[in-house]
Image (cartoon, grey):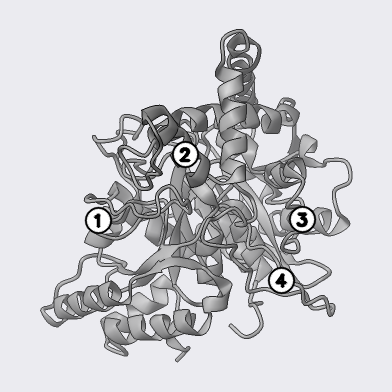
Amino acid sequence: MATLTDLTIASARAGLDAGDFSARELAEAHIQAMAEHKTLNAFITETPERALADADAADARRARGESAGPMDGVPIAMKDLFCTADIRSTAGSHILGPFVPPYESTVSAKLKAGGSVLLGKANLDEFAMGSANITSYYGPVTNPWVAKDGDNRQRVPGGSSGGSAAAVAARMAIAATGTDTGGSIRQPASFCGIVGLKPTYGRCSRWGIVAFASSLDQAGPMTRTVEDAAIMLQVMAGHDPKDSTSAPYALPNFAEKLNAGVKGLRIGVPKEYRVDGMPAEIDRVWTQGADWLRAQGAEVVEISLPHTKYALPTYYIIAPAEASSNLARYDGVRYGLRVDGKDLKEMYENTRAEGFGAEVKRRIMIGTYVLSAGYYDAYYLKAQKVRSLILRDFTQAFEQVDAILTPTAPSAAFVLGEKQDDPVQMYLNDVFTVPASMAGLPAMSVPGGLSDQGLPLGLHLIAKPFDEATLIQVGRALEDAAAFTARPAGY
């Protein structure tokens, strides 16, 4: 039997059902792994007592012949952007450091009701703003992977869900929640060699998730297999009347087409994603992915998404605009940190100046500028019009194909601090993931191979709205062909 920390959701569930081990033994193994790998800084708040209590409750249910669901007794990490009742929820920010919500987000409530075991709150870029997990007030997260060419410098895990990705890759959690605004589930999944699934906007409730950009934010699973992503999404998803953007659709069985294969499917490869200066290893894994699908009976065709080149600049108008509005609520009165001043105005200024980090301040300033009188039409309104054109490109493409295949990120995990002083270079990490976010489409990163330095590279799939089942179907085909068994040394 594999060690307990090597198990997937599916194999852990099978072992628990067979009585091979208890949920408490499973939780204890992961708590020990968290203690051994603290240097990764993957968690902001660890909750071992809660984990053991959750595990004991799961064991008691099984002893009575009951089950809370397919994740009953499975240890997970929760990105610290989800509010969890009576557990500190920081969003990676100093300004929310003392904040202990009295309520549970809908997604974490669903996972709790489904019997999952909460190991702790995973580190993230402050308010989910970042592509490297270096902007957290609680320190950067380190990628458990190191290069195999003798370059032992520490790498970033990607962002903003870098703590979640590192925890899953380093065997500290079987799975984790993430949130994705412009690629924050998929890019760290690619950097850490795991599966990351961003569902269709509206598939998972945003209620109780600290908002970054409300028209883009979406919760999703981060796991080590495509099957686990399907299992976890089934528990997380569903209509929520408390979220007006939650889609009132019945849930399909996401795992139904897991083993259907891709014979007869048409897979689109967008020519605009072959950007200037793309590293040869990225192009190689992308071509290999297309060949794998072709070999399994899919028809791979070239498609055009002509407005793709506008997606990244458009995103960096819309997302900061929404962030500047959402973050206005943190003023020292209602949540978390308060820094006193001689009057109310100075208290606001002192609280926000001390509470927000540099990247958050940068985006608030950009967002406030593009929303200001005289610039709203020139920037924000125009960006929304371009966003409609990006969606139209995808709509027309999906008249020809069932799914779209691209690389997940333009590079493997880079060295910690490498792009820290160049925000534009950092923003380019999301160049392949942002278009699907702008269109609200489901997308997934699956490990596709290793770079020349032995670091993970992801393959990125995009599907039609609310067609996560096809995403999982094609993702499983890629996973089978890639047979990605590599893992970070020492984990």
In the picture shown, does residue 314 fall above or below 216? above
Report the residue that reaches farthest toward the front: 342
Verify CB contact (< 8 Å) between mark 4 and mark 1: no
Q: Position of residue 312 (x, y in %)?
A: 69, 33
Q: CA distance from mark 4 to mark 2?
A: 35 Å
Look at discs 2 and 3 and give the one toward the viewer.
2
Identify which residue, 379 or 468, lies in the foreground: 379
Separation of disc 4 and disc 1 at Cα?
A: 34 Å
Dividing the image into 4 quarters, which one contains the C terminus?
bottom right
Residue 13 placement (x, y as % from top left): 33, 75
Say if mark 1 contacts mark 3, CB within 8 Å.
no
Residue 85, numbered label: 1
Calculate the distance from the C-alpha at mark 1 to the C-alpha at mark 2: 28 Å
Packing grade of label 3 (10 A; few <14, some 14-19, many >=20) is many
Question: Is residue 318 at all visible to an observer of this figure?
Answer: no
Mark positioned earlier in the residue sequence (4 or 2):
4
Hey, what amino acid is under mark 4?
Answer: Gln
Badge 2 marks a residue whose secondary structure is helix
At a point 72% along the width and 63% down the height, the residue shown is: 416
Residue 411 image label: 3
Pointer 1 local density, CA inside 10 Å: few below 14, some 14–19, many at least 20:
some
